[in-house]
Image (spheres, grey):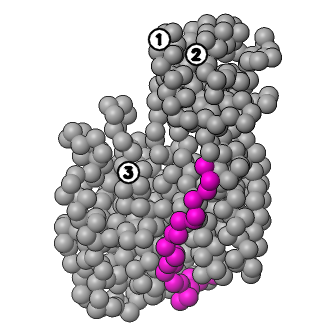
Amino acid sequence: MNSNTQISQRPKANGAKVSPVKTAITVSYGDGIGPEIMEATLRILDAAGAQLDIDTIEVGEKVYTSGVTTGISNTAWDTVRKNKIFFKGPITTPQGGGYKSLNVTLRKTLGLYANVRPCNSYYPFVDTRHPDMDVVIIRENEEDLYAGIEHRQTDEVVQCLKLITRPGCERIIRYAFEYAKNQGRKKVTCMTKDNIMKQTDGLFHQVFREIAPQYPDIQSEHLIVDIGTALVADSPERFDVVVMPNLYGDIVSDVTSQISGSVGLGGSANIGTSCSMFEAIHGSAPDIAGKDIANPSGLIQAAVMMLNHIGQFEVAETVQNAWLRTLEQGIHTGDIYRKSQSKKRVGTREFADAIIANLGVQPQFMSPANFEGFQAITLPEYTRRTASKKELKGVDVFVDWRGKDPDDLAAKLQVIENPALKLSMITNRGVKVWPNGFDETFCTDHWRCRFSAPKDLWVRKEDIIEVLQKAAISNVDIIKTENLYEFDGVRGYSLGQGQ
């Protein structure tokens, strides 16, 4: 469809009731298999009676290679922001050259804080070891390591900052509980790694503990993400709604999609307060592009989520039921085709044709879709809490030093002490190496050197500046500093391993 293409006004004999109200959406066909699966999906939506006023934009590989490092032009931004609903095919990010991930850019710039990925079993029509699987992964979509703040600090060490905020935690966790309440689900599971990352993942877990009691009718539990992921892979039927920070959510949602039968079956909604984006969870698969073999199911599932989001529930049910019936009939694309249960192996276009032929037909074995109770989720505006009492307790000074003996580095650093800040610890890759370090500990050229206040002394920022000035005079190569604070008497910084 070209820009501003109008959906046909003809009666939909096999589809849903036609609404006279059209919803403006922005569509990008994407890269690789994107144009094939988008064309197939839009044909299905048209035949089902979806009332859409479509603006088409170009984003992704062609835009990148034209010299736009973000993969999206200013004009395309204007269209997306005007229509608020973005239906996007998978895109390819060129390797190297400083190109930014368009998906990350869209999610963060448009405030698409919640990534929602339902993963269901379609057994026995799609092969899976988990016939009772019905789990929804709700992933925080803007923060965590996906902030993309990285630095090379020494010859041997680079860093990536993991940013977790209280507003971000409150918003995604409350969204998960509201989603469970809205959809009649019984349990929300939180997964973090707060046994190691006590400040960042610890905050996420703490906010979960604060919000969970506000939903007494919904069970809640917390799992460490490593064992949690293992349990998802082994026994997904024990989970209902799972909420987690960005990186874990990305990984676990791919796990759940794969074990449900195929990553190609998974759709994704990216929800914000004003804009939303809908896409398949898989990539652009350029190796099979143009061969008419790609499975459009992930994008079809994203379309169903979009139709529910914009209030076209009957059309969403019609499309979903036709898709389910097509799976039941054994009409399958190659990624899910199995001789034991499939009847016909088809390509992208023929699969879409089969779904269109089934519009208005209910599945015979799987439960028909019923989206009647679907409601938009509205969250309360974030309220900033009363500020904590913040006290400066010291500074971590990060040093680039190519020596090997921490005692030698300590001797250099003790020269730059002042009465308010004394060298108390040196760590390397988070492991304490001074004082009383072990010879067996391998050290790189990146050292965290902690200067702390002796008991009962106050630390001023001027004291930190004095240490840094002395370091410059003494040729100590400081690459970064982090002030150490207590908030209402609670330490707001980590200790070294071995402390």
- Choose the circle earlier in sequence order: 1 or 3: 3
- Percent across and percent down for residue 15 are 40, 87
**Location of the C terminus (image quadrant):** top right
Marks 3/2 in contact by CB < 8 Å: the verdict is no
Q: Give the range drawn in magenta.
A: 367-390
Q: What residue is shown with label 2?
A: 416
- Choose the circle earlier in sequence order: 2 or 1: 2
Q: What residue is shown with label 1?
A: 473
Residue drawn at x 48%, y 54% as measured from the top left: 142
Residue type pointed to by label 2: Ile
Q: What residue is shown with label 3?
A: 105
Q: Is residue 285 above or below residue 343?
A: above
Mark in front: 3 vs 2: 2
CA gap, disc 1 to disc 3? 42 Å
Q: Does the magenta stretch include residue 374?
A: yes
Q: Can residue 186 be seen in this view?
A: no
Residue drawn at x 46%, y 60% as measured from the top left: 280
Residue type pointed to by label 3: Thr
- Percent across and percent down for residue 494 are 69, 38
Q: Does the magenta stretch include residue 231?
A: no
